[in-house]
Amino acid sequence: MRIKINSSKILNAIVLIFLLIISIFYVYPILWLFDASLRPLIDIFQVPPALFSGSFEKMFGIYTFNSFINSFLNWGTGIALINSVLVTCSSIILTVFVCSLCSYAFAFMNFPGKKIIFIFILSTMMLPLATMIAPYYRVLQKLGLTNKLIGLIIPYAAYPLGVFLLKQYFIKIPVSLIEAAKIDGAGYFRIWLRIIMPLSKPALAAFAIIQFKEVWNDFLIPMIVLRSGSLFTLPIKLQLMDSQTFNKPYDAIIATGFITAIIPIIFFLIFQRYFIEGLTGGIKG
Amino acid sequence: MKKIVLLFIAFLIVYEVNAAGKKVLMWSFAANNIAEWQERKADIEKKFNIELVIEQVAEQAFVQKLQAVMMDGKGVPDIIEWKIEQNQILNADPKKCFVYPLDKYVSKSNVFKNVVAGRVSWVKYGKSIYGLPHDVHPVVLIYNDTLWKSVGVDLAKIETWDDFFTAAQKLSVEKKDGKPLHYALPWSATMNDTMFMIWQQTGAQILDKTGKPTLNTPQFKEFVTKWIEWYKTGTVCAWDWGNFAALLKNGTLAAYASPDWWVPQVNEAASSGQYQFKVKSLPYYKKGGPQTASWGGTFLAIPKTAKNPDQIYKIMEYMQYDSSAIKVRYQKTEMLPPFASVWDDPLFKKEDKRFGGQKLGELQTTLAKKMPDVITGDLFWDVIFRDFGPNLSEIVSGKMTIEQALKVSQAAAEKRYKDAAKK
C-alpha cells in the first residue's frame, strides 16, 4: 500500500519544528528566571540548573517564595511595582490621548506649515537620548516637576513615533466617513472621539504596547528625574539592588527581575492580536 | 558701643540659627556603604550641625545625572561617592574635572597623612588628589589547603606565579567528562578580575604620567605573554559571580585572589569543615616585587558646584576616617580602612577560624602598607575594558597574536586619548 504524502504538510511540520526550536531560545530565559526566582539563593546558579537534574525532589521539591518575600520586604519592590504601574498606565492614557489628537490633525486638517511641523516632530526621533538629558532635566526643574511621578508621566506624552504610527493608520480611514459626520453636524472633537478612535483600535493597541514597553523598561529618565526612594520604579530598584558592591542579593534581584519581565509579557499577550494588525495596517498606508 | 556689641551678638545668634541644620546632600551608588552612612547619620549631623541627606543614584546613570544637575545648578550634591577604578568624573586636567582638587586640604591635614600612599595613587590624577578613598582592598590568595596538599603541593611555599601555575597542573590532572575536577584560579576572559589584580604586581602601567595609554610597552607585552602561557595550562575556570561560594564549597575552585570584600565567599565552604582553607600573600610576579594589589572600592569627592568645600572636606574626612567608626566598618564588612594609624589595634590581629587561626587582618595590613602605585586617569578603565579587553579575547581564541592585539589596542586607546583631548 502506498502512503500518500502531502508535501505541504511535511513542509509545515518542518517549519513548525524549526520555529519551536527557535522559540526555546526566547522562552528559556523567562523560564529560567521563573524557576530561579522560586529557588533558595544557594541553588540559583547551580550548573547544570536544578530544573534539569532529573529528580522531581530536586526539580520542584525546594521551591520557596523567600526570594519574593525578601524582595518585597527588604527592597521595597511593592512600592516600586505600584509606581511603575501608575506611571506606565497614566502615561499610556495620556500619550494615546495627545498623540491621537495630534495625528488626527495631521491626517485630516489643513493648516499652514503642516508638512514642516510633521517633519520636525519626526526629526526629534533622531536625537540621541544622551544629548537630551541635561535640557530635559532643566525643563522639568524649571516646571517644578523633578522628584515627582507626574514629572515622568507628562514628558512621555510627546512621543513622535506614536504621532507617525497613528497618522499612518488614520489616513487609511475613508474620508467619506468624516465628510458624512461633518454633514451631520459633528465637530472635530466629536469625529475624533466617535469615528476615528473606535475605528483605530488595532493601531491604538499596537501603540499602547510599544509605549508600555518603553515606559515600563525606562531606567535612565526616571533615575535622572527622581530622587526619593519611595518614588523609584522597578527598573531603578533592579539597578540599585545590583549596585551592592558585594554580597549582591541575587535572590531578590531575580524575583524582581521576574516581576519586571512578566508584566509586559502578559500585557502583550492580551493585546497581541491588535498589535500585528495595528502595525501592519499603520505602516502599509 | 553697647549697641554695637548687642547688634554683633544678635548677628551671631541669627547667623548660628541660619547655619544650623544646613542641608548637605550626598550621592552614593554603593548600597553597602549607604547602610553605614545611614547608621552614622545622626552622629555626623550632630558633629557638624548639618542635615545630611543621602540619596542613592544607580551607577548606570550616575555620571549623566551629575552632569545634568551640575549644568542646571539645582539639586547638586555636596558630596559624591563614586567608583575608584571606572572613572569619568576625575580628570588630570583640573578644568575638565567634575570635582574640586583636594590638595590644599590634604596637604594640611593630620588625618589624611595616615592614608596609605598606594591607595592615594588611585585618586591622584595628574598632579592633584581629587578624592578620599573609603577603603584599600588589599588582595590576598585564599586557597583550599586540603586539595592542594592532596596533590603534593604546599602552596604556602610557592613563591612566584610561574611556580603557582606549574604546581596547578598537578591539581587539574583529575578529570571528569574531560574537564578538570579542580581549578587553580577563576578568570573571566577579560582583564577585569584576576588578571587585573596580578597586572598591578607587574609595574607595567596602562597610562603614563601624562595620561597617555601605554599598552605597547615591553613590560605589558611580557605580562600578557605570561598570562596567556598560564591560561594555556588549562588550570583556570570561569569567574562565576553568582556561583562562587558553591564552587569553593564543592572543591571546583581551589584558590582565588581576593580583596577584603570578597573574602566572605569562603565562609560557607570553610564552615562546612570538608576542606581546610588557608590564606597567603599573592605569589610574586617577579621576586622582590609587590605581593598584593587592590580591586574595587570607592572614594568621596566634592563636586565643583558645592558651595562650601572647606566644610564639606571636614565632613568627608570624618565620614571616611573617624577611628572608632572605621573599626566598626571593619567588624561589620571585613573592609580594611586605608587609614594606617588604626591598624595596630588588636582588632586587626585576630586569629581567623576560617583559615585555621591564621591572622587575616594582620596579613592584609602588612600587605596594604606595600600596595603598588597605579597611574590612573579618566581613560584608565576604558583602555582596559574597551580597547584591550576585546582584543584579549581574540588572543585567547587564537584569532590574533599578542603583538597584533597590543598594536590594535594601543591604536584604539591613542584615538580615545586624542578624542578626549579635543573635548
Image: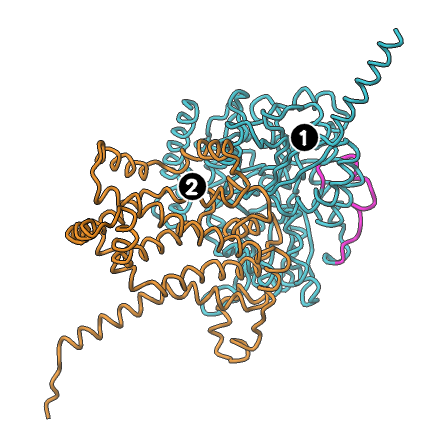
Chain colours: A orange, B cyan
- In front of the other: B386 or A63: A63
Please name the residue shown 60% across and 47% down the image.
Answer: A229
Q: Is residue B17 magenta?
A: no
Residue B294 visible in the snapshot = no
Which quadrant holds residue B15? top right
Marks counted in the figure total: 2
- Badge 1 crowding class, 10 Å Cα cut-off, few under 14, some 14 to 19, many 20 or more, is some
- Would you say A282 lies left or right of A31 here? left
- Give the image location of residue A99, x and y in percent: 33, 46
The answer to whether residue B167 is above or below residue B418 is below
The answer to whether residue B378 is above or below residue B365 is above
- Give the image location of residue B201, x and y in percent: 58, 38
- Give the image location of residue B300, x and y in percent: 64, 34
Please name the residue shown 66% across and 24% down the image.
Answer: B309
- In front of the other: A187 or B204: A187
Label 2: chain letter: A
As drawn, the residue found furthest toward the front would be: A185
Q: Amino acid at mark 2?
A: Pro
Please tell me the numbered disc located at residue A237. none
As drawn, the residue found furthest toward the right would be: B2
Quarter of the image with the N terminus of chain A is bottom left
Residue B56 visible in the snapshot = yes
Label 1: chain letter: B
Which residue is denoted by mark 1 in the rendering? B117
Task: State which region is magenta.
Answer: B337-353
Please name the residue shown 49% across and 53% down the image.
Answer: A86
Q: CA distance from mark 2 to mark 1?
A: 48 Å
Q: Amino acid at mark 1?
A: Ala
The answer to whether residue A21 is above or below residue B24 is below
Helix or strand or loop: what does disc 2 sit on? Answer: helix
Which residue is denoted by mark 2 in the rendering? A155
Q: Can you tell which of label 2 and label 1 is closer to the viewer?
A: 2
